[in-house]
């Protein structure tokens, strides 16, 4: 399946050299199994429908941690090489093109079809 996920939370080093074409940065899941970030919840099904088909581009869901960890300026995903300032964020690995929050549902089809 072209969509897979990191451990929760992800280790930043394990995400640096992955074979996937896209990285999807989401909040971690809480004790009930739900993403703690409402914006991530809002696009979760859309992301799954987009990347789960066998002919879809490959993507890796990267769990950035629980809210207290993510909110720290020192969160490892906020700095290089990812520079994620907000979740959810989708990054095309080849060129670093990205969509953030509300841009995802409107712009993902274009991001998938344009050349890096």
Image (cartoon, rainbow, N blue to C red):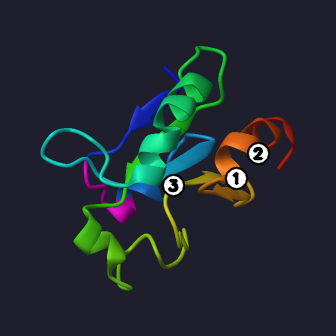
* Distance from Cα at disc 3 to Cα at disc 2: 13 Å
Q: Provide the secondary structure element on which disc 2 rests.
A: helix
Q: Residue furthest bottom?
A: 73
Residue in the image at 30% along x and 53% along y: 36
Q: Provide the secondary structure element on which disc 3 rests.
A: loop
Q: Badge 3, how many Cα within 10 Å: few under 14, some, many 20+?
A: many
Residue in the image at 65% along x and 29% along y: 57
Residue in the image at 33% along x and 70% along y: 70
Q: Would residue 21 appear left or right of 75 to someone viewing this image?
A: right
Cβ atoms under marks 1 and 2 closer than 8 Å: yes
* Distance from Cα at disc 1 to Cα at disc 3: 10 Å
x and y, in percent, of residue 92 in the image: 68, 50
The residue wearing badge 3 is: 88
Which of pointers 3 and 2 lies earlier in the amino acid sequence?
Answer: 3
| Number of numbered callouts drawn | 3
- Determine whether 78 is above or below 20 in the image: below
x and y, in percent, of residue 76 in the image: 38, 74
Which labelled disc corresponds to residue 103? 1
Residue 21 picture quarter: top right
The residue wearing badge 2 is: 107
Specify start and end residues of the magenta stretch as a single range.
8-13
């Amino acid at each position: 399946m072209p969509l897979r996920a990191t451990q929760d939370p992800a280790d930043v080093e394990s995400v640096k050299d992955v074979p996937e074409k896209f990285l999807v940065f989401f909040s971690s899941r809480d004790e009930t199994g739900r993403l703690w970030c409402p914006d991530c919840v809002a696009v979760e099904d859309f992301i799954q429908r987009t990347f789960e088909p066998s002919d879809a581009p490959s993507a890796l869901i990267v769990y950035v941690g629980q809210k207290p960890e993510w909110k720290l300026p020192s969160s490892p995903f906020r700095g290089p090489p990812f520079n994620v300032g907000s979740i959810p964020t989708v990054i095309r690995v080849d060129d670093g093109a990205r969509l953030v929050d509300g841009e995802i549902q409107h712009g993902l089809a274009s991001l998938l079809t344009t050349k890096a």
